[in-house]
Image (cartoon, grey):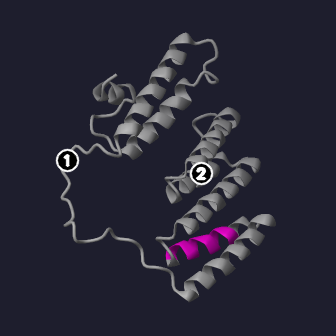
Amino acid sequence: MNLEECYRILELPQGASLAQVKSAYRQLARRYHPDVNPGDRTAHEKFILLQQAYKKLVRVLPTFRSTPVKSEPPSRPPQTPPPLSAFEIQLKHASYRQLQEFLKYRCYQRAISLVEGLASRLPQDAEVRQWQAVTYQCWARQLMRDRQPQAAREYLHRALKADPDNRLLWQEAEKDFRTLDRLYGKET
């Protein structure tokens, strides 16, 4: 299967970004998944093709670029975020302890306020982005229990946007999306 076929199977134009590939795959996988279409051989075959196309594009896209990129001079080291100050480290640890308490006692609105404030203060900190994603996911699951599927979907999307490189988060979010589809239908 060549790249052109992969894009066609995922119903995307050639040269689509990795984010577009992931989004298209999630949408189409939900539509053609065997659990959603039991006994439908065509849907099953389409689902297998989707998986193959997705795997190939994900493997190729990070290194493939359709437009040339200017390379940095070799003497310049790659940009790394500046180290946290002692105050920022202390703030981060205190916020994390407070966040744990808020999540433990299901004070989700307070947890979201805390983690969003911390994320705006420390936008380059990967741990903070992870905490933000987890907080959004916890709130989304509470919204699912409260039968608010649209709001739950919104917070699951926010979680994925907060920590887009977290594969475990993507797997858990896909399970949550499937649960939402099963309980409330795809168009909620």
Counting from the top left corner in percent of width and height, residue 70 is at 18, 58
Residue at the far bottom: name it.
87
Instruction: Give the structural element (helix, strand or loop) at label 2.
Output: helix
Q: Residue at the spot x=57%, y=55% of the render?
A: 159
**Is residue 125 positioned above or below 147 on the image?**
below
Left or right position of 142 against 33: right
Instruction: Give the structural element (helix, strand or loop) at label 1.
Output: loop
Residue type indicated by callout 2: Leu
Residue 67, disc: 1
The residue nearer to you, when weighing 157 against 167, is 167
**Is residue 19 positioned above or below 44 on the image?**
below
Q: Quadrant of residue 65?
A: top left
Q: Residue at the spot x=52%, y=86% of the render?
A: 85
Mark 2, residue position = 156
Q: Residue at the spot x=41%, y=39% of the render?
A: 58
The residue nearer to you, when weighing 98 against 85, is 85
Residue type indicated by callout 1: Thr
Counting from the top left corner in percent of width and height, residue 67 is at 19, 47
Label 2 vs 1, first from the N-terminus: 1
**Is residue 123 positioned above or below 161 on the image?**
below
Q: Does residue 128 appear in this view?
A: yes
Mark 2 → mark 1, Cα distance in angstroms: 32 Å
Counting from the top left corner in percent of width and height, residue 77 is at 30, 70
CB within 8 Å, label 2 to label 1: no
Residue 142 colored magenta?
no
The boundaries of the magenta stretch are 110-120
Label 2 Cα neighbours within 10 Å, binned few <14 / some 14-19 / many ≥20:
many
Residue 162, disc: none
Location of the N terminus by quadrant is top left
Magenta-drawn stretch, dominant element (helix, strand or loop): helix
